[in-house]
Amino acid sequence: MFGEYFDNVRKKRPLICCITNCVTANDVANALLAIGASPMMSDEMLEMDDMTNLSDGLFLNTGTLREAAVDIMFRAARQTAKQNHPVVLDPVGAGATDFRTRTALELTMDIKLSAIRGNISEIRTLAVGSGTTQGVDADAEDQITEETLAMSAAFTHFYARKTDAIIIATGSIDIITDGRKYYTVRNGRPEMTRVTGTGCMLSAILTAFLAANPGDFLKASSSAVIAMGVAGEVAAERMLPGDGNATYRNRIIDALCNMDGKVLDERGNYEEK
């Protein structure tokens, strides 16, 4: 069901402009290359119009936010939206500091975003206008579990309708919704939380999936989430004694590189609601 969305990325090879954080930029670029997309990394105002005119989608990440980058993000997002290309926001650390929270909220209010992908605390912060996170990680009380799934789905539904964007709240269970229906995804491994950048990689490849599949952003988003989760599972299966989280990160990228739609369909663990 979802494999064709992955295969479309390999066929169309979308070019994704990334304004992302310096901690994970290399991993983001490699993850995009692994799925068959192409990355362009920049946060320079002087070339932003050219970058967005060339690209098929824009990925914004607030992980190491600088004041000078805020105007660049807005300019890039407006230019991308004029071309009807997808704009994806990863509001890293929303709720941790006023600067990050305010910037992410302003982007959601002033820019037509195609999708917003974050952990459940970041999404909750944006949905209600305030909140807290543990640095860049979700608060323990916000975790999506079987017991909290219905409640989490309800407020992500509300937020998707409010923003007219696909909302992706990721955790041990992932929720992807357009405000009308939603998918839950149970792929992935706990070890993925020990690797810096798995969320950033997911948000970047999500942008590529939307660029390559403009007809159905909900299923394209769900496909990207499944692909990243399956990559985490495959990577864990290939770990050897003595391997650690640095090796695990590389194996995740390797798993994405060797994945295709058939693998995704065979291993996808999801429900439609």
Image (cartoon, rainbow, N blue to C red):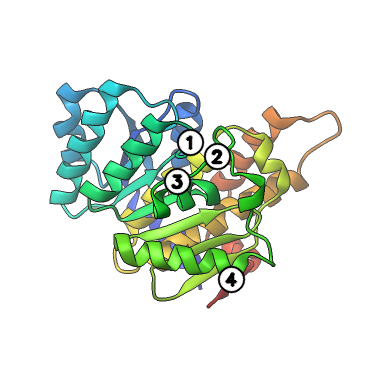
- Disc 1 from disc 3: Cα separation: 14 Å
Q: Amino acid at mark 4?
A: Ala
* Mark nearer the N terminus (3 vs 4): 4
Quick one: label 4 or label 1, which is nearer the N terminus? 1
Q: Nearer the viewer, residue 30 or 218?
A: 218
Q: Is residue 49 left or right of residue 159?
A: left
Q: Which residue is mark 1?
A: 93
Residue 43 in view in this figure: no
Q: Which mark is residue 133?
A: 2
Q: What residue lies at 58% left-to-right and 71% top-to-bottom?
A: 150
Residue on which the image places disc 4: 150
Q: Secondary structure at mark 3?
A: helix
Establish if 266 lies above or below 128.
below
Q: CA distance from mark 3 to mark 2?
A: 19 Å
Q: Nearer the viewer, mark 1 or mark 3?
A: 1
**Picture layout, residue 243 above or below residue 105:** above
The answer to which quarter of the image holds residue 227 is bottom right
Q: Are discs 3 and 2 less than 8 Å apart at CB?
A: no
Q: CA distance from mark 2 to mark 4?
A: 21 Å
Q: Amino acid at mark 1?
A: Gly
**Mark 4 Cα-neighbour bin, 10 Å: few <14, some 14–19, many ≥20:** few
Mark 1 falls on what kind of element? loop
| Label whose residue precedes the other's in the sequence (3 or 2) | 2
Cα distance between the residues tagged 3 and 4: 24 Å
Q: Which residue is painted at 50% across and 24% down in the image?
A: 23
Query: Percent from the top left, x then y, of residue 176?
Result: 48, 63
Identify residue type, mark 3. Ser
